[in-house]
Image (cartoon, coloured by chain):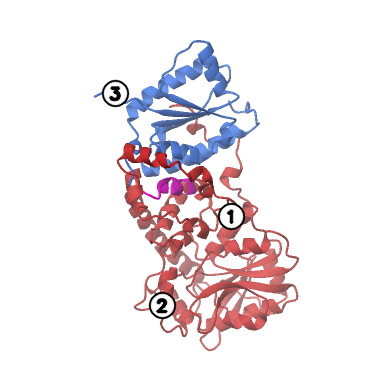
Amino acid sequence: MAEHEPLIIAFVCNWCTYTAADLAGTSRLSYPKNIRLIRVMCTGMVDPQYIIKAFLEGADMVIVSGCHPGDCHYINGNYKARRRIKLLKEILPKFGIEKQRLKLTWIGASDGIEFAKTMQELVIQAKTIGPNPARTGAGL
Amino acid sequence: MANTSFLNVDNDNVLLSIQKFLKSILDLNDIEAILAPLHKKDGKNIMPVFIADPTLLNDVDPLAPAFAMNAAKLVSKLTHKPMGKKIAVVLRSCEIRALIELVKLKQAYLEDIVIIGFDCLGTYTNKNLAFLMASDTTDLTQRFCENALAGKEPPIEGGPNLSPACRACEYPVPENADILIGLLGLDIKKQVLLQALTEKGNALFENLSYTESEEPPGRKKVISEVISKKIEFRDKMFETTHKATNTLEKLSDYFASCINCYNCRVACPVCYCRECVFNTDVFDHDPYQYMQWAKRKGAVKLPADTNFYHITRLAHISLNCVGCGQCSNACPNDIPVMELFKYVANNTQAAFEYEAGKDMDQPPPLSVFKEEEYLDVVGIN
């Protein structure tokens, strides 16, 4: 049987992590194709329901990534995101969605290398955790 | 220091003395109406009513084991803009706690209201109450209060048990009332306790001629015994709920009979959005979407998005949840909604060291942040 190819949803902020992803691309750095980037203006606008939806649709991992503390383009959106991630890390494991499937990182606009490395590491971790049962189950 | 006194009870009828007390409040010049549960003579319902005519206070019945809805939402309707008049509201402990949350969310204001709370002896679900009230309701409140205070379960012999939310409630004595009517640790055939807990309560108290007295010495012990019994029930309930919902598959079974009516959302006193995302066209899925789900998962429950709805509501309001149980009460298919929400709320509130409805000065966790906090949730390891 072929190895499970994890699906990772990444909510990345326009000003830092998306720019870092862009930089990774223009620098011809490669990172796995398992990542689906969703560009948002700020991590502070990632409503918990986006993350819940991603997991219920079968995402093996969700990462929210934005500017380092103090660097938020909107001053404090990343601090708000951190509290929401904290909240979801309490709620989701109650229903068998492991804490390790949800990540929050700060990757600045100039961190193209960091971005590529993080994505490579996430895919390794997602393979270790295994597939999210919601992808094909829990339909009824 | 609390201003403490007693209300004397005549003719073994605690309700009469409370009605008399409420009349004395309405007689005061500055209080022009009272929100309180009203039991119309021969009526089969006990509902919150906003009363300006003192004679109608003869039918007020706050101690009845009835809890048709969480009246915090009604106080929000009465206070979200200045009314220009002062009013009193008679609320249960969980209603006051929900009101505190609404005030923090700027959906209700306390400036023009006096909160009268009372030791809550619990309530029945609407269905069970209707069952009880279909038969003889004479002295129902008095019988209920006496038996409940004596620790009888169920409180009305041969009747149903109290609702699970009430049996698992850790807050029988309201903490944020201006005036508290105490029943626990008292002989309610003789007297009930009357305490002013705030400045506002004290000011009102001064206009009423009660003699200063002491809290009965045994009261604190009775209260702590009642609470530990409820916590024992609560913890067992958490254990059962955890086992029934700890995978998504089990959660689907738990909510299998959910018809997405969203009654739990309407009944919830702290579900604060003006427009709920689940009412928007985000959820008018393309018909082909259902086919894709069905093919991928083998089948898809319809109406869809049930788990999504409930988990999203948990993310939105579990930090504000006061465990009043109106979600379960409102469910047409008797899904134990409160059991799950209270269980998750207990965990999320502990994670943020927050207790919903407890402290007016503690901001809701998602409304604030600090620069250095929760560093453990950041990073990929």
Name the residue that disc number 1 marks.
B101
Residue shown at 67%/80% (left/top)? B53
Which residue is at the front of the view, B206 or B76?
A: B76
On the image, the x and y values in percent for residue B125 come to 43, 68
Name the residue that disc number 3 marks.
A3
Tag 3, which secondary structure? loop
Q: Residue furthest front?
A: B287
Image quadrant where residue B81 sits? bottom right
Tell me, yes or no, if residue B108 can be seen here.
yes
Q: CA distance from mark 1 to mark 2?
A: 32 Å
Q: Residue B132: which disc?
A: 2
Q: Is residue B305 magenta?
A: yes
On the image, the x and y values in percent for residue B232 come to 38, 60
**Label 1 CA crowd tier, 10 Å (few <14, some 14–19, many 20+):** many
Tag 1, which secondary structure? helix
Q: Which chain is drawn using red?
A: B
Q: Which residues are magenta?
A: B302-313
Chain identity of mark 1? B
